[in-house]
Image (cartoon, rainbow, N blue to C red):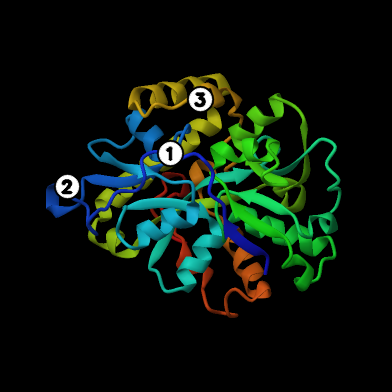
């Protein structure tokens, strides 16, 4: 196991998750929920927010309850009823399902390709050149037990480190908006940077990648949005409307010119009035989602279920991949269930 600990930086997260009841507050026809509670991310736009702006959610309303920097926290909040929908790395969803949480993935929301990937960067001139050089060093990631940790474990394993040696590599949690700064101030030795924050950091120079998830795994949809199974059962019409709108928003980013997507994201960020910097959106390039409209491929979960079994994080056969996700509500899946 890689050693992990939290580090406190001198920046507070905006809009921390507020206390919520375990059920949606607003109901409509047939007693189904008409309001979807969710968490946002600083300086970026989630697919529910994009779907709402594009008019794809119809009469469904979104209720923002705060921001998060952690996929595992987001889906845990979904599992416990603090929010109605959340997204995370598919491996984290497998682990949450293995713990007994009754959540189900309904659409992919981020992925890896040549344009959108997570890189692990060091300063130019750093003595760190190989996986072995990471022994005793600190890697800044947005959260533990998720995408960056899984990628790092694989890199260390392929680099020939024993479990005992890998245990000497330390993962520290740093808010994504502060990770570049932490690297440049040498608070950490390696920075996990992705998407627009990566591109913005690269534009300033002075850093280069040690490894990337794209180099290790190639293109794939990496994370999905989940709903609780009881929410789906109690709100079938709302679920379909939400997932359809979500999927159409994903497909919109997959098919529209980059400039149009950037303009729409800036409009949404400015309109919501959360005192955010919109400049980073200029570096947006791709959703990275492999399936049209976020359609889920079984291998996007099977890969991580198999990997977690090999790592000893879950027992063989502890989870059935077919139980973790569904394409039933996705309009691009011709209504076929997983």
**Measured along the vertical axis of the image, is residue 36 above or below residue 300?**
above
Query: Residue 8 or 45: which is nearer the viewer?
Result: 8
* 235 left or right of 260 in image: left
Percent across and percent down for residue 265 are 46, 26
Q: Which mark is drawn over residue 26?
A: 2
Question: How far is disc 1 from disc 3 in space, using C-alphas?
Answer: 12 Å
Question: How far is disc 1 from disc 2 in space, using C-alphas?
Answer: 21 Å
State which quarter of the image contains the N terminus: bottom right
What is the secondary structure assignment of the residue under circle 3?
helix
User: Mark 1 and 3 residues: CB-CB less than 8 Å, in contact?
Assistant: no
Earlier sequence position, callout 2 versus callout 3: 2
Q: Is residue 257 visible?
A: no
Q: Within 10 Å of the Cα at label 2, are there few (<14), some (14-19), or many (20+) other Cα atoms?
A: few
Give the residue at mark 3: 261
Q: Which mark is drawn over residue 300?
A: none
> Which residue shows up at 29% across the image and 64% down it?
230
Percent across and percent down for residue 282 are 57, 22
* 329 left or right of 169 in image: left
Query: Residue 240 or 159: which is nearer the viewer?
Result: 159
Earlier sequence position, callout 1 versus callout 3: 1
Q: Write down the quadrant of residue 76 in the picture.
A: bottom left
Q: Write down the quadrant of residue 194 in the picture.
A: top right
Percent across and percent down for residue 157 are 78, 64
> Which residue shows up at 17% across the image and 47% down it?
26
Q: Within 10 Å of the Cα at label 3, are there few (<14), some (14-19), or many (20+) other Cα atoms?
A: many
Give the residue at mark 1: 47
What is the secondary structure assignment of the residue under circle 2?
loop
> Which residue shows up at 40% across the image and 33% down it?
50
* 315 left or right of 266 in image: right
Q: Within 10 Å of the Cα at label 1, are there few (<14), some (14-19), or many (20+) other Cα atoms?
A: some
* 198 left or right of 297 in image: right
């Amino acid at each position: 196991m890689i050693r992990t600990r939290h580090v406190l930086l001198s920046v507070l997260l905006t809009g921390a998750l507020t206390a919520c009841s375990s059920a949606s507050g607003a109901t409509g026809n047939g007693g189904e929920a008409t309001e979807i509670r969710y968490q946002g991310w600083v300086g970026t736009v989630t697919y529910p927010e994009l779907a709402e702006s594009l008019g794809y959610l119809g009469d469904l309303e979104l209720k923002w309850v705060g921001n998060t920097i952690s996929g595992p926290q987001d889906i845990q909040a979904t599992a416990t009823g603090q929010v109605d929908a959340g997204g995370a790395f598919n491996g984290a969803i497998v682990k949450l399902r293995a713990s007994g949480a009754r959540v189900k993935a309904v659409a992919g929301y981020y992925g890896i390709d040549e344009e959108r990937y997570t890189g692990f960067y060091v300063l130019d001139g750093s003595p760190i050149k190989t996986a072995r050089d990471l022994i005793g060093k600190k890697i800044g990631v947005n959260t533990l037990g998720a995408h960056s940790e899984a990628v790092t474990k694989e890199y260390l394993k392929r680099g020939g480190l024993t479990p005992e040696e890998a245990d000497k590599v330390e993962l520290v949690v740093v808010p994504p908006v502060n990770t570049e700064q932490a690297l440049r101030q040498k608070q950490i030795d390696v920075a996990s940077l992705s998407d627009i924050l990566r591109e913005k950091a690269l534009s300033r120079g002075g850093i280069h990648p040690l490894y990337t998830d794209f180099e290790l795994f190639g293109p794939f949809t990496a994370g999905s949005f989940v709903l609780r199974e009881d929410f789906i059962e109690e709100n079938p019409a709302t679920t379909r409307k939400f997932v359809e709108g979500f999927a159409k928003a994903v497909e919109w980013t997959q098919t529209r010119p980059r400039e149009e997507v950037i303009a729409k994201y800036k409009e949404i960020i400015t309109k919501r009035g959360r005192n955010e910097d919109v400049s980073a959106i200029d570096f947006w390039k791709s959703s990275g989602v492999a399936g049209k409209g976020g359609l889920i491929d079984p291998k996007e979960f099977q890969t991580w279920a198999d990997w977690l079994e090999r790592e000893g994080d879950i027992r063989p056969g502890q989870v059935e991949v077919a139980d973790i996700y569904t394409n039933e509500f996705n309009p691009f899946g011709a209504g076929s269930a997983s």
